[in-house]
Amino acid sequence: MAGRGPPAVPTDRWSAAIGRVRSDRRQGARALGAETLRALDLELRGWPSGPAARLHRADRAIARDLARTQVAMGLFGRWAAEWRALARSATPGRRAAWVRRWQQLLAREDRRIAARARGRIPPRARVLTISRSATVAALLASLRGSRRPSVVTVLESCPGGEGRAMAADLRRRGLAARWVADERAPEAVSASDLVLIGADTVETDGTVVHKVGTRRLAELARRSRRPVVVVAGRSKFSPRRVLRLPPRFDRTPARLVSAYWTDGPARAKRSIRPTR
């Protein structure tokens, strides 16, 4: 009786996991990235040690899957490029080390951003944001005393309505938060001191890819002389431009951004002060 052949790689388990990530329209880049890394960690544990040519084909398939997943989120394109480079000389240990390194980077990004940015928030600021950025939420929830916002307003962020969920998240964390309809954005900007936005990608020229409506919000803020700050980990800073932007995302040019707060040194273009 003929024995069973070696297991197929990538496995059906990986295909199912990356398919779920690709179709997700609710979670942000960091959450989806963490889910992808968990799936990749499980995938690698089941890979045989050879032959090398077979594993290289599997590596190419993994890179192809990453490149096609959440194309507006630069993290996945960056990972695809890194995986292709890694695969040329990879051992099982090097693949696993790459996954662990990125898991550690993502796990500590929000804490480092909060630690660096806390002192830059104006006291009792009226903050305006859009969509449902976990990084923005973590920063706001970390604020204490006079640095805690007097109110956080979140645009509803249609068509997905993520702003409603963001406001609820912030209230659960003890912040005074509310959501308003997108058409009330001009009024919300006028009533704010500071606009904080997350990012799915920050391109090399500083352009921000984020939820559709972000550019309009930044343009309104510029006309009202309200600072716009991008809050994003360095994992979001991509060396590659997002070529195919899905309809639910837009691009905000760097000229509309006052500063980028990240887990490295802040890239400030202007000082951030309350308007009132």
Image (cartoon, rainbow, N blue to C red):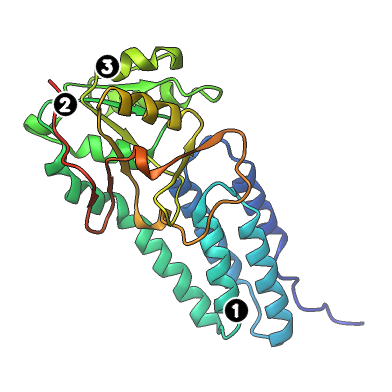
Q: Residue at x 38, y 28 (%)?
A: 219
Residue 125's mark?
2
The image shows residue 242 at horizontal and vertical percentages of 56, 51
Q: Earlier in the sequence, mark 2 or mark 1?
A: 1
77 relative to 224, above or below = below
Q: Earlier in the sequence, mark 2 or mark 3?
A: 2
Label 2: element kind? loop
Residue 190's mark?
3
**Separation of residues labelled 2 and 3 (CA atoms):** 13 Å
Label 3: element kind? helix
Give the residue type at disc 3.
Ser
**Looking at the figure, which quarter contains the N terminus?**
bottom right
**Number of marks in the image?**
3
Residue position marked by numbered label 1 in the rendering: 87
- Residue 224 horizontal side relative to residue 251, left or right: left
Label 1: element kind? helix
Q: Residue at x 43, y 46 (%)?
A: 207
Give the residue type at disc 2.
Ala
Give the residue type at disc 1.
Ala
Nearer to us of marks 2 and 3 is: 3
Q: Are marks 2 and 3 in contact (CB under 8 Å)?
A: no
Image quadrant of residue 80?
bottom right
Q: Residue at x 16, y 26 (%)?
A: 125
184 relative to 247, above or below = above
The image shows residue 223 at horizontal and vertical percentages of 32, 24
- Residue 228 horizontal side relative to residue 106, left or right: left
Hey, which residue is sitting farthest left in the picture? 146
**Separation of residues labelled 1 and 3 (CA atoms):** 51 Å
* Front position in the image: 153 or 46: 153
**Looking at the figure, which quarter contains the C terminus?**
top left
